[in-house]
Amino acid sequence: MGLLRDPARGVQGARMKLLVVSLLSFLLAACATPRMTTPPEGLFNDQLFQPASERISAQDVFAVSPEMKQYLKTEIAQQARAKGTQQGLFDALYSKHQLQLDYDAATTRNASQAFAARSGNCLSLVIMTAAFAKELALPVRYQSAYSDETWSRDNDTYFFIGHVNVVLGRRLHEVGPLNQADQMTIDFIPPMEMRALRTVEIQEQTIVAMYMNNRAAEALAKGRLDDAYAWARAAIEQDPGFMSSYNTLGVVYQRHGNLAESEKVLGIALQREPNNTHAMSNLAAVLNAQGRTAESQALARKVEQLDPDPAFAYFNRGLKAMRDGDYATARDLFAREVNRAPYYHEFHFWLASAYAHLGDSDKALRELKLAKEYATTRDERDLYSAKLDRIRSLQLQ
């Protein structure tokens, strides 16, 4: 049986933000058709954008910095000699007495950036772990993990949150023929949740494409469309079969006002995944912006048939109820979102707000604690800590 590891407090229970911007489901549907190995012609339109403001290179993703090499020679080597290479690497990176890594989903980092910052989202930590493992000559495999859909948002942009982990083999001189017992799975969710995940092995080029797609989504959320285009373009070139990047590129074109280009890219995504409701929703918006109302409405109806209860539906109705002063209805709607997405911090926060307006400070305090626990950035944790202090102070008065 493979070893499961639950990292130290700071990453425990957190969710990796595999940002697939507005909105592409990261499912196995792409396996139904042959995987694309080259991008379709006419997909990119560099003349519409300015050059990226930052370096974009696949070589940077797993690059090991001098600081990482020094840590490898000291802490990791010492642990590896005492406990074996696999366990030594894990302990040197994730023991609470070592790096003190913190989970922070605000930015997707490459290996050296995650090490320097001592923080990252799950994808960043997977990349950093793999970079060290390869330096130690450990065989590395990557897995994409599937469970119930989980979402996040940044203003009017919605993100599907996927998950990946890394599996380390043993060095050949440390063991005989490899078998499943020689594998160590390093994941960034608790072991109990790991058992409910379905996994499929993915290639390193897909991990790199995921990284680049995350960077595109993060740039898009900040309004940096030139950078978002460059990152999405690089993601597709890195792995033409990773369809999430096509959706991201389609949204970049849409936000940039290039509706025909957006329609083309989203159409390609739907050709590969015909029942992808998220790409459909984006394409419906593009068709509506082009004045093609009938086509847009037809797609919207198909989306509603395929997904009658979409993510954030109860949440958005709850926000309206809050604005209307109907806090009991808001409470019930937010509770429904919590039930189907129990690890999303914002749902707990707004449920706490509804409880506070209803005068139930104990339940408000409970939900705020959960919001803080599941927060994915330091800023969010600081915000919820301040609100927790406020409620506690009112309880003492």
Image (cartoon, helix red, strand yellow):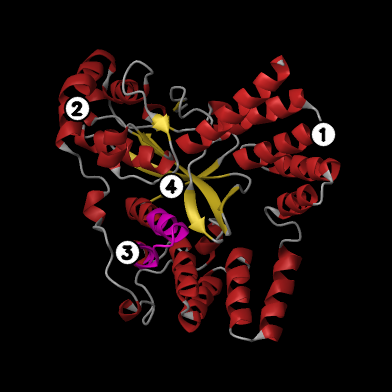
Q: Residue at x 30, y 31 (%)?
A: 177
**Residue of label 1:** 358
Tell me whether circle 3 and circle 1 mark residues in contact (CB < 8 Å): no
Residue situated in front as seen by the camera: 72 or 328: 328
Q: Is residue 122 above or below residue 47?
A: above
Q: Which of marks 2 and 3 precedes in the sequence?
A: 2
3 or 1: mark nearer the eye = 1
Q: Which residues are magenta?
A: 213-232
Report x, y in % for residue 345.
Answer: 60, 38
Identity of the residue furthest to the front in this view: 397
**Residue of label 4:** 201
Residue 93, picture quadrant: top left
Q: Secondary structure at mark 3?
A: helix
Q: Separation of disc 3 and disc 2 at Cα?
A: 30 Å
Q: Which of marks 3 and 4 precedes in the sequence?
A: 4
**Amino acid bearing label 3:** Ala
Left or right? Give the position of 363 relative to 131. Answer: right
Q: Which of marks 1 and 4 precedes in the sequence?
A: 4
**Amino acid bearing label 4:** Glu
Report crowding for label 3: few under 14, some 14 to 19, many 20 or more residues within 10 A (C-alpha): many
Residue 354, picture quadrant: top right
